[in-house]
Every structure is written in C-alpha cells, then in structure tokens.
Amino acid sequence: MINHYFHQLLAITLLVSSTTAIAERGPAIPDYPADRVAENVYVIHGPLGVPSVKNQGFMNNPAFVIGDKGVILIDPGSSVQTGEMVLRQIRKLSELPVVAVFNTHIHGDHWFANQAIRDAYPDVAIYGHEEMRKLVLKGEGQRFFETLMRMTEGAVAGTLEVPPNQSAAHGDELTIAGVTLRILFEPKAHSYSDIMIELPQQRILFLGDNVMSKRLGQMDSGTFNGNIAAIELALESRAEIYVPGHGRTGDREVPETYLDYLSSLKEEVAKHFEEGLSDFEMSPLIVETLSRFSDWVDFERNVGRHISLAYLEVEAELF
C-alpha cells in the first residue's frame, strides 16, 4: 500500500515540477532566529498572520532536534525559500545531516519547504499521516500552493511539491538518530490529517495546527469536536513544553488557552442554536463572550467564520 501511494505521489510531484519549474523564483527569506526550547531542541517562531507579500508566506514554526547522528526536522515551512532559511539556521548549530522530516498536516505552509530539504539530502525520510498523503493525491497541496502564490504575489515561486514518502500513524514510536518520537493522532481535528509529535524523553509535544497561540486560523477542513479531542489528548501526555503550529512555545497554558477558545465558542453556538437564533443573529453575542481573545491576530477575520462552521456542526449533530 505504501509503495502504491509513493508512486502516485511521485507522479504528482513530477507533474507539478514540469508546470512550475519555469516560474520565476521568489526572493530569499531573511533569517529568523532558532530559539532553544530544550537541550538540542530548537523552534524558529514564524511571524503571526496569513500569507502576505511582507512575510513571503512564512508564518509557521519550523522545529528541529539535533540527535547523535543526524537532525530531525518538523514542519520545515511554506516554500523552498523557507526551507533554505531553515537549513541555514540548522547549520549554525550542527554539521550533521537532516535524516528525517515530519509534516504535521496537509496545509502547505507547513510542508512545501520539503523541497529544500530533499534537494540538500536526497535520501531523507519524510513522514506524514496516511490521510495527509491521500489529500495530496486529491490535489489539496496544489490548491494550497495556488493560494500561497496569490496571497504572496509570487514570493513562493519555484517551489515544487515534495510530499511525505513514509507514513506516521497514531501510537507509532520511532527512534531516529538516538531520539525517541511518539506519534499522536485524533481523526477529524484541525484538518483530518493532523499528527502531533511527542518527544517523551524531553517532555516536549509538537502540536501542529491543532493548537495556535495568539492567532486564529481556519477551521474549514476540520471539526470543533475533533480539534477539542486532539487538545485533550495532548494534555494527557507527560509533556511540559508545548510547541503550537503558530505562536510562541510555552507550557500547558498554550493548549489550555486554545481549548478554552474552541470549547467556549462551540458551547455558545449550541446554546444560542437551542434558543432558535441563526448564526448571523448569535454572532455579535458570541463575539462579546469571547472578547478575551479579541487581541489575537486574525480574530475579527476568522471568528465569524468559526461561528458559522460551529453552527453547521451543531446542526449536523441533531441528525
């Protein structure tokens, strides 16, 4: 089965390569610092917000772990340019090769930088959940890339789609370059394809976009119930350090705060639904209830959409 998907994914990659290679290459990404969050574990905290000309599509949190014989990279970023920047930061700290890459989910701002890593290390293993690999086959990656091109006015040009070639499933425990990693997965969370990656020895958990900090993202391809369950699963771990997909790394307060947002919004929607209000009618009431999050980046742009999606989810639960 894995070989079957791999060959299909390779065919897609070659197709995308042939259609995008002629595009003018976007500009280099300026260096962002790698913040040490634990011994041999670093996070490059990207700027908050949506893809733009200013951020050149870079806004996630690439992370890397320096093992005894190689480097493990998690969510290298949104473009070949971002991947090259991430490699520059790694090389400031280690001359070891990148031996594995983990992609937390289908949204391309987290994995299009795979290209730069594979170009530098052709034999690198790239891990993703099988649901992510299926979504790539359905064209979800290419659609996201087209959005990035539009929102950045071509800053990500020259990037080719290099999807995972290895599967990572819930409960998998791997030891790579002397580092133990444990995979957590909750179906129907942020995007139906989201893995979280635990480093049990370091007590660190990479949450992907199941959790964001000081920023709201889209929920169009996931469910509130699933995302809430994923955060509850994360909080059951023995982790002490939590790395969100966007926003600053921190302690349990990071996932707990995002859980508060999702749970409060869903509960308020359900309450007003029972009162017979439409999503349009309940929206200003819920926005007021959630005012403690109003300073989060993209709150005004996304909260109304979140209310509408939660409304549909509540409605569907009745049937």
Image (cartoon, grey):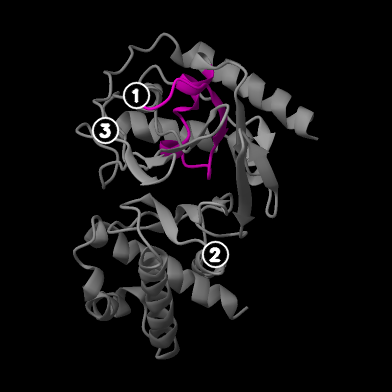
Dot in front, 1 or 3: 1
Label 1: how many residues lie within 10 Å, few (<14), some (14-19) or many (20+)? Answer: few
Q: Position of residue 290 (x, y in %)?
A: 27, 75
Give the vertical position of 66 relative to 28 (above or below): below
Q: Which residue is mark 1?
A: 92
For marks 3 and 2 on the same chain, the one whose residue lies earlier in the sequence:
3
Q: Which residue is mark 3?
A: 32
- Which of the 4 quarters of the picture holds residue 300? bottom left
- Which of the 4 quarters of the picture holds residue 264? bottom left
Check disc 3 and give the amino acid type.
Tyr
Secondary element at tag 1: loop
Give the vertical position of 305 relative to 198 (above or below): below
Q: Residue at x 41, y 65 (%)?
A: 255
Indicate which disc residue 238 carries.
2
Label 3: how many residues lie within 10 Å, few (<14), some (14-19) or many (20+)? Answer: some
The residue positioned farthest toward the top in the image shown: 22
Q: Residue at x 45, y 11 (%)?
A: 21
- Magenta segment includes 87: no
Q: Position of residue 145 (x, y in %)?
A: 43, 31
- Magenta segment includes 95: yes
**Which region is colored magenta?**
92-118
